Amino acid sequence: MNITVYGPDGCSNCTALKQTTEAVVERHDIDADVTKETDMTKLAAKGVMSTPGFEIDDEMVFSGSTPSEDELESIITERL
Amino acid sequence: MVFERFATYVVDALGLEGALRAAAHFWVYDTLKILAILTAVIFGVTYLRTYFPPEKIRDYLDGKTAFTGYALAALLGIVSPFCSCSTIPIFLGMVGAGIPFGITITFLAVSPMINEAALFVLPGVVGLELTALYAVSGIAIGMTSGYSLNRLGFDRYVNEFEFGDSGVDIDEPTRRERLEEAYVEAKEIILEIVPYVLVGVGVGAFIHGYLPEQMVETYLSGQWGVFGAVAVGVPMYTDILGVIPVVESLIGKGLPVGTGLAFMMSVAALSLPQFMILKKVMQKELIAAYATSLASGILLIGLLFNVVL
């Protein structure tokens, strides 16, 4: 699974979201690549206007909010 | 005010005297006052903002002509997010959706320059008059910059990009969801701003207690001070709420109001990290023109108010 967190440098929510994602992935031993995309034109290309954008395998799952670790965990695990 | 009394109580209890007393009083009082207002305002604004997601802002602006569009973009810029890092995706979304270029620039400029929390903190700190000047001139600068960059054809320097369709469903949240969202966002924003406020109030307190009025008089009171304020303020990256206490104490020491205003606005509107983010979505010609038009607008406002007020 590929997880992409979209967010420019300087957006602390976005950095935090990536860290939480990594923690979830590690805890459940999920085979996933977590990357951060700082090029905002790529986010615009997805039609999204709020950061962070959270994408799993080309599906923009949510944007503009930072769910709690538990919520994030269920978002990721239900797509396994 | 209860904060005033508390600050006095603290300096009394510590047995402070003279300049140190003045500085410590300023620090305690301003920190409490700013943080209290900030917490209330940010929570209120983040709640209201759940009614204005970026997609809605974009739709409001779509199809608006000339003056209405610019004025609306400026007003929406005021209530938009605090951090320029979240303004840029909105800017791109607007450009992608075909909102006229000048209007998107106005939005991009006003958004960091006029901060809604600052609008509530400022009256208690520098007075209602300066607050109104700050808001009106920020809007004027944003609108003028957007309009002129548009007329000069700078839209060709926005990087090409595809604007896609989002797969995310945006459904109307319930009141409970709005409150939750506002709570989470407000908490994040406040935690992010607090260090800037503490440092800013610290610098302000130092100035208040120790900087001789003579120095402000000698070095900062002339019209050249406005140029200096803008030159220092533009590259600087800090939160406007951290600048307010510094400007407050400088004005208290005799800094001309226009110079203070120019400093505050240039710190808020432009910064090096912001240029880095902009560089990814626009070419350097546009960034340079954008920075120049905002900086010269701020400069003019500062010079003008120093003469008029």
Image (cartoon, rainbow, N blue to C red):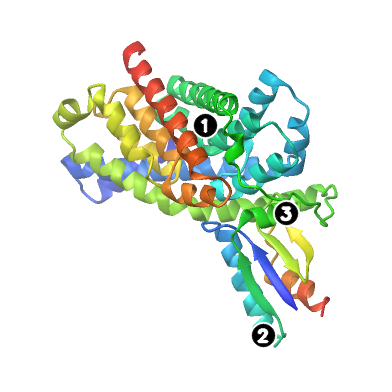
Q: Which residue is mark 1?
A: B119
Residue at (29, 45) in percent of width and height: B203
Front-most of B194 and A77?
A77
Badge nearest the viewer, 3 or 2:
3
Q: Is residue A10 above or below residue B51?
A: below
Q: Which residue is mark 2?
A: A27
Query: Mark 3 and mark 2, same subunit?
Result: yes
Q: Residues within 10 Å of mark 1 (few under 14, many from 20)?
A: some
Residue hosting label 3 = A45
Looking at marks 3 and 2 on the same chain, the residue that comes earlier in the sequence is marked by 2
**What residue sits 73% from the left and 21% below the top?**
B65
Question: Closer to the camera, B117 or A12?
Answer: A12
B269 and B249: which one is in front? B269
Q: CA distance from mark 3 to mark 2?
A: 32 Å
Image quadrant occupied by the C terminus of chain B: top left
Find residue B181 and report its horizontal and vertical position in percent.
70, 53
For the point 26% across and 21% down, which residue is it? B223
Output the chain of dot 3.
Answer: A
